[in-house]
Image: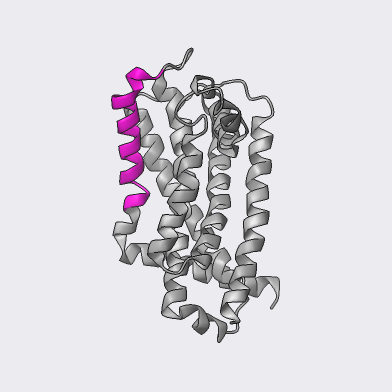
Amino acid sequence: MNVRHALTDTLVLAERSLLRVRRQPDLLIGYTVQPVMFVLLFVFVFGGAISTPGFDYVDFLMPGIIVQSMAFGGFVTALGLADDMKKGLIDRFRSLPMTPGTVITGRTLADVGLNVVQLVVMIGVGLAVGFSFATSVPDVVAGLALLLFIGYAFSWVFAFIGLIASSPEAANAYGFTIIFPLTFVSSAFVPVQSMPAWLEPLASVNPFTVMVDAVRALFIGTPAGNNVWLAVAWATGIVVVFGTLAIWRFRRVVTR
């Protein structure tokens, strides 16, 4: 198979994943309703109790909660792959003259499109509750690109989870159990300095802290340091590691 055929296969499978969402619109709840509920909950319920010196809490919060939403954007890939494995559809793909890895790359590419929708919704809600950008247009565009790259990276994490899970329900549980705590033990919702002394070092080295701080610097002008480049490095590393693991697992599963 040459590169052109691999690209064509990837686009066809990406379209298939997007069409599934159109046929099952309830899947969009995870991309829209749930993140909006988090924004409203933290801004209006917890916001008054959390101190963020130098910033309104909504400006501090939005970069963090958007990073969290992007990270969970790949859950549809996990559910879809687990469902395809359970129904034996992966074996049907094997009988077709297509590049094997495109089954996964097509799904992760579709996640980028869904994450764009989620990004529009999140920023719209943020602006409605008082969030405002405080940096230049190029910085904001760079922040949006970084968010989509972070979402793409975690799609590969969810792809691997979907391939090792025994069912779609298990894939969903694994994803939230593993990733959800990491997003809270970070600078996404509160400054790490406000955490207990034993927890602060863990939060400081958490990749989510680096990613959130990078987006925060690009959106509201906090000191960037090396966070932007480190966030890109983390996302790239996640793609390489979990992309390799997902493709390895896919080949093992379909050749049993």
- The spot of residue 202 in percent (x, y) is 59, 32
Q: With respect to residue 17, does 27 lie above or below?
A: above
Most distant residue in the top direction = 54
Q: How many marks?
A: 0
Q: Is residue 100 visible?
A: no
Q: Is residue 246 above or below residue 132?
A: below
**In this view, which residue lies farthest toward the front?**
198
Residue 123: quarter of image: top left
Q: Which residue is located at x 41 percent, y 42 percent?
A: 120
Question: Where's the C terminus, which quadrant?
Answer: bottom right
> Looking at this rendering, what residue extends furthest in the bottom direction?
95
From the viewer's perspective, is residue 256 above or below residue 18?
Answer: below
- Is residue 30 covered in magenta? yes
- Residue nearer the viewer, 141 or 129: 129
Percent from the top left, x then y, of residue 2? 70, 75
Depth order, front residue of 148/139: 148
What residue sits 53% from the left and 24% below the top?
192
Q: Residue at x 65, y 41 (%)?
A: 232
Magenta includes 14?
A: no
Q: Main secondary structure of the magenta part?
A: helix
- Residue 49 in percent (x, y) is at 35, 18
Magenta residues span 29-50
Q: Quadrant of residue 245?
A: bottom right
Query: Residue drawn at (38%, 63%), measured in percent from left and top?
Result: 169
The N terminus: image quadrant: bottom right
User: Does the rendering let one see residue 34?
Assistant: yes
Q: Position of residue 78 (x, y in %)?
A: 47, 61
Q: Nearer the viewer, residue 104 or 205?
A: 205
In the picture provided, is 31 more to the left or to the right than 90? left
